[in-house]
Image (spheres, rainbow, N blue to C red):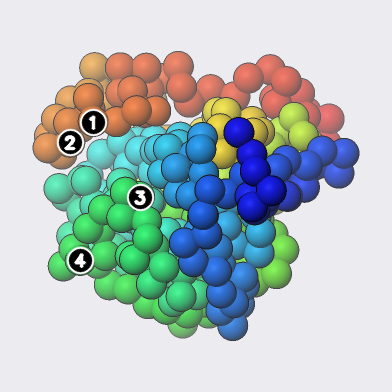
Amino acid sequence: MSSSKDVFFDEPLTPGMFRRIRARSILYSANSPYQQIDVVETEEYGRVLYLDRRFQTSEAEEYFYHESLVHPAMVIHSVPRKVLLIGGGDGGALEEILKYRTVERVDMVELDGKVIEVARRFLNRICANAFEDPRLNLVVGDGRAFIEKSSDSYDVIILDLTDPMGPSKYVYTKEFYDLCRDHLNPGGLLSLHNDSPFFYPEAFAVIVNTLKAVFPHMVQFVTFIPGYLLDFAFSVCSSSPIPERSGEEAEAILRRQGLDASSLKWYEPERHGELLKLPAYARVLLKQE
Ligand code: SAM
């Protein structure tokens, strides 16, 4: 039930649609040097993080996005030791990465230190204690500048970035993907999201075709993200052939990693092969280019 005191968060979803979420209360609202940050309490999603009034993640459904972004790549790799996470200030992806016992170091590069501060204060159900993990090397700065200067290489690189507007527009380019490729160890993987093939077919095709110009091997899949109310595509890319994993193998990898598969809600290791397939409606878009 709404009342005259309610505050509504309106946001365009596509050029012809917008959605309105009623905030029961506003827990935090301020501008950082980069963006407006809001954390609000809602009926359906629990606490929601907004950046520039765009829904980023929520307590209730964060696992759809964070598990999709992290587990396929980590399981395909099977023994990731060094991981680079670019963006992801809410800590949800970081928390998933740190579940792997072979991970010795995560370099996390987030542009906006305020997002991290706000996540630690208000979004503990999303980041848990990930920011306290001794394996984390946290860098507050621009992901592209970091990788340009870095001489390190990684087993897995994960991009958890805002949409290509404002501060993240230089990290959706071929030059940036070239840099990522050059900082991967042999057999290393890049994992990222590729927008909505149904609602943004052009953006999807452009991102995937840009990735294809850099990486000869890719696995792609689509899932529904309740927070975005959109279908959403993800890619795992590599310079080396990507090993196919049977359900049994994926289960065995998680067991060796000490990761309890029953604690996951989207990634089901026994369905690994089935989950990581691109449906026909999205495949067709790539053929049209
Ligand atoms: N799941 C989210 C989504 O797509 O809706 C992304 C969430 S995460 C909060 C995105 C983060 O990327 C933000 O905290 C933002 O500050 C960070 N970011 C944007 N551009 C960046 C860059 N160039 N380098 C590092 N972090 C960046």
Q: Which mark is residue 259?
A: 2
Q: Secondary structure at mark 1?
A: helix
Query: Residue at horizontal 60%, vertical 62%?
Result: 51
Q: Amino acid at mark 3?
A: Ile
Does residue 187 sit above or below 157 in this rendering? above
Q: Which mark is residue 126?
A: 3
| Separation of residues labelled 1 and 2 (CA atoms) | 8 Å
Q: Looking at this view, is 208 or 166 the one in front?
A: 166
| Separation of residues labelled 3 and 2 (CA atoms) | 18 Å
Q: Secondary structure at mark 2?
A: loop
Residue 195, percent from left and from top = 66, 43
Q: Is mark 3 within 8 Å of ligand 1?
A: no
Q: Is mark 4 within 8 Å of ligand 1?
A: no
Q: Secondary structure at mark 4?
A: helix
Does residue 271 sit above or below 97 in this rendering? above
Query: Residue at horizontal 45%, vertical 16%?
Result: 274
Residue 104, percent from left and from top = 18, 60
For label 4, the residue is 132
If you read the primary sequence from the N terminus, does the residue marked by circle 4 or circle 2 appear first? 4
Residue 203, percent from left and from top = 76, 45
